[in-house]
Image: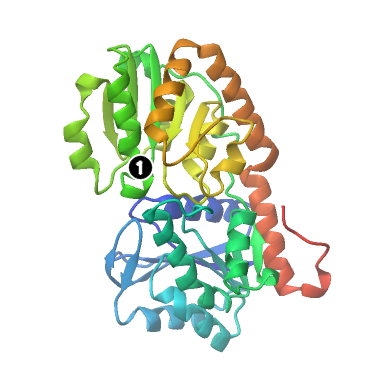
């Protein structure tokens, strides 16, 4: 099968990770994948670059010639399926028209985070994104979402249920697995905690940093911040190494990230809104105790396998749970085992890809489709 995949290679974000992991897995299974993405570099046999005016971790502004470049490329490629891991750009809205004109089946993966209870202005803003995209998504042949909660939201916004498919994010559980790490020795820490992700307002990282500052664990207990974003300069100036906070920035090496996850005691995700966090799944797969807010699909992933926080009480709740994790490593180890088991049961990349391929086949050969194919 030939899949034309419209996604992101940079700057680093969850969409980049999703595109990389899924396309690499499809290629490993013998499928042909042509990646169409916004970039300035030259094209290759397996990639087509689309011109842009601006791109960020959140959204992209294509150049005026991007639509023609995309249309011409798809006309030449004639793939079996076009799959858009939506980049939050104007091209998302014209893809259905382009693919209908060319007679190409079209799939979207819709990433925007959400909080089903819309408890703050960030959540309300994200819900507006769902409202804004819904009429367009209704024109795609299939829309992949990460949870039934997202499917319900889109159904209320008149995206037909017959066109939405629930395929959670998945993790390579052989690569992301428990194993030896001497990261604590490297960082001179007896106990080590991690946040990994963008440093943006919706991630609510300052709530974690405030709790950490107030607890004052001393020099042997440290918090590693992996990631970059608009808030990093401000937060890094306020919450310093003297407080036991180690700012690592964006770590491009996957091996280094796995080394940190394997050796740390717990992963903390204090977001106000989420979709389904790949960082959370990767941490769970490495056998870490995980603490996350009950937003997006993270709550259903972690329920019974970690600690869930209310997103409007993060600092207060972390002041309670972090000392427990520091003082009782056996409790964290138990949570880590439960987290790993949960991923193995429901969130492996292998199952994710098998479900995705069935979705493609269902579109291409509907008469051969079997029973319902949601998890």
- Which one is nearer the viewer's eye here, 196 or 257? 196
Q: Picture coordinates of residue 129 (x, y %)? A: 44, 66
Residue matched to label 1: 204
Q: How is the image coloured?
A: rainbow
Q: Picture coordinates of residue 130 (x, y %)? A: 49, 66
Relative vertical location of residue 354 with respect to residue 74 in this rendering, above or below: above
Q: Picture coordinates of residue 158 (x, y %)? A: 60, 74
213 with respect to 294 (left or right): left
Relative vertical location of residue 263 with respect to residue 122 in this rendering, above or below: above
Q: Which residue sits furthest left? A: 237
Q: Residue at x 24, y 45 (%)?
A: 231
Relative vertical location of residue 11 with respect to residue 264 in this rendering, above or below: below
Q: Residue at x 47, y 49 (%)?
A: 274
Relative vertical location of residue 194 with respect to residue 281 in this rendering, above or below: above
Q: Callout 1: 10 Å neighbours few (<14), some, many (20+)?
A: many
Question: Can residue 117 be spotted in the picture?
Answer: yes
Q: Which residue sits furthest bottom? A: 101
Quadrant in the picture for residue 164: bottom right
Question: Can residue 45 be spotted in the picture?
Answer: no
Q: Specify the quadrant that holds the N terminus.
A: bottom right
Quadrant in the picture for residue 238: top left
165 with respect to 95 (left or right): right
């Amino acid at each position: 099968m030939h899949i034309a995949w419209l996604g992101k290679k940079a700057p680093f974000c969850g969409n980049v990770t999703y595109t990389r992991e899924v396309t690499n897995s499809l290629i490993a299974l013998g499928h042909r994948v042509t990646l169409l993405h916004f970039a300035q570099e030259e094209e290759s046999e397996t990639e087509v670059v689309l011109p842009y005016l601006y791109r960020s971790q959140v959204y992209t502004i294509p150049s005026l010639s991007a639509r023609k470049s995309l249309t011409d490329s798809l006309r030449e490629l004639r793939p079996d399926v076009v799959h858009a891991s939506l980049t939050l750009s104007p091209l998302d809205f014209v893809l259905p028209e382009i693919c209908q004109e060319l007679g190409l089946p079209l799939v979207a993966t819709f990433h925007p985070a959400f909080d089903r209870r819309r408890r703050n202005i960030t959540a309300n803003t994200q819900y507006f994104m769902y409202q804004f995209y819904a009429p367009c998504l209704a024109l795609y042949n299939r829309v992949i979402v990460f949870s039934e909660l997202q499917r319900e939201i889109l159904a209320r916004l008149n995206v037909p249920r017959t066109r939405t498919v629930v395929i959670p994010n998945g993790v390579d559980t052989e690569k992301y697995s428990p194993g030896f790490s001497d990261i604590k020795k490297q960082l001179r820490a007896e106990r080590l905690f991690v946040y990994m992700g963008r440093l943006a307002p919706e991630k609510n990282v300052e709530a974690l940093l405030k709790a950490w500052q107030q607890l004052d664990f001393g020099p042997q207990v440290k918090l590693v911040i992996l990631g970059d974003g608009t808030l990093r300069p401000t937060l890094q100036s306020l919450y310093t190494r003297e407080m036991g906070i180690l700012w690592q920035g964006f770590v491009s090496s996957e091996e280094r990230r796995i080394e940190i996850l394997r050796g740390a005691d717990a992963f903390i995700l204090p977001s106000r809104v989420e979709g389904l966090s790949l960082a959370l799944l990767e941490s769970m797969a490495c056998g870490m105790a995980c603490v996350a807010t009950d937003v997006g699909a993270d709550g259903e992933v972690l329920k019974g396998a970690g600690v869930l926080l209310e997103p409007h009480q993060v600092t207060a709740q972390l002041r309670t749970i972090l000392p427990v994790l520091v003082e009782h490593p056996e409790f964290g180890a138990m949570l880590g085992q439960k987290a790993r088991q949960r991923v193995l049961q429901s969130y492996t990349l292998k199952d994710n890809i098998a479900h995705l391929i069935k979705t493609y086949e269902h579109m291409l050969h509907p008469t051969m489709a079997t029973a319902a194919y949601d998890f």
